[in-house]
Image (cartoon, rainbow, N blue to C red):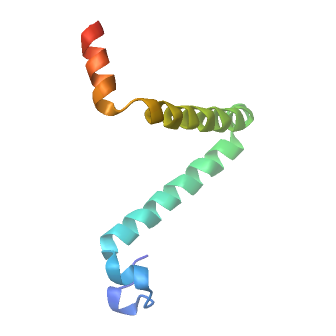
Amino acid sequence: MLMPAKYQPDYMFLRNVPMRRVHLFTAIQLVCIVVLCVIKELAIISIIFPVMVSRLTILSSCQTEIERFFNKTTVLTDRNCTA
């Protein structure tokens, strides 16, 4: 992670992406793995976690279906009319 740019492997995606962005992505991955380890260790959260993930998956698919029928301007206009 702290390797200078000249020692990085010569991959096509590393040529087009700024090194700061690559480091940010690596930091996000590290934070995610730490959060997953904490969830695994806490018994109360570890039981509920699969249910939360399945609910989020269902909600995101519902949001995709809703966006198919309504666009942002329609939703904003309807919200302003009911207020």
Q: State the image quarter where residue 4 is shown.
A: bottom left
> Which residue does the image show at 58% across and 56% down from the upper left?
33
Q: State the image quarter where residue 25 is shown.
A: bottom left
Q: Quadrant of the N terminus?
A: bottom left
Q: Is residue 35 above or below residue 20?
A: above
Name the spot of residue 80 as percent of width and height, x first: 25, 15
Name the one closer to the observer, 19 or 82.
82
Q: Quadrant of the C terminus?
A: top left
Q: Is residue 54 above or below residue 24?
A: above
Q: Seen from this angle, which residue lies furthest front?
A: 69
Q: Is residue 13 left or right of residue 49?
A: left
Name the spot of residue 7 as percent of width and height, x first: 39, 92
Name the spot of residue 48 as percent of width and height, x first: 70, 31
Q: Is residue 8 left or right of residue 16?
A: right
Q: Is residue 2 left or right of residue 60?
A: left
Q: How many marks?
A: 0
> Which residue does the image show at 39% across and 78% down from the upper left?
2
Name the spot of residue 21 as percent of width and height, x first: 34, 68
Name the one closer to the observer, 37 or 74.
74
Q: State the image quarter where residue 44 is shown.
A: top right
> Which residue does the image show at 35% across and 33% down from the upper left?
71
Q: Is residue 76 left or right of residue 57?
A: left
Name the one closer to the observer, 65 or 83.
65
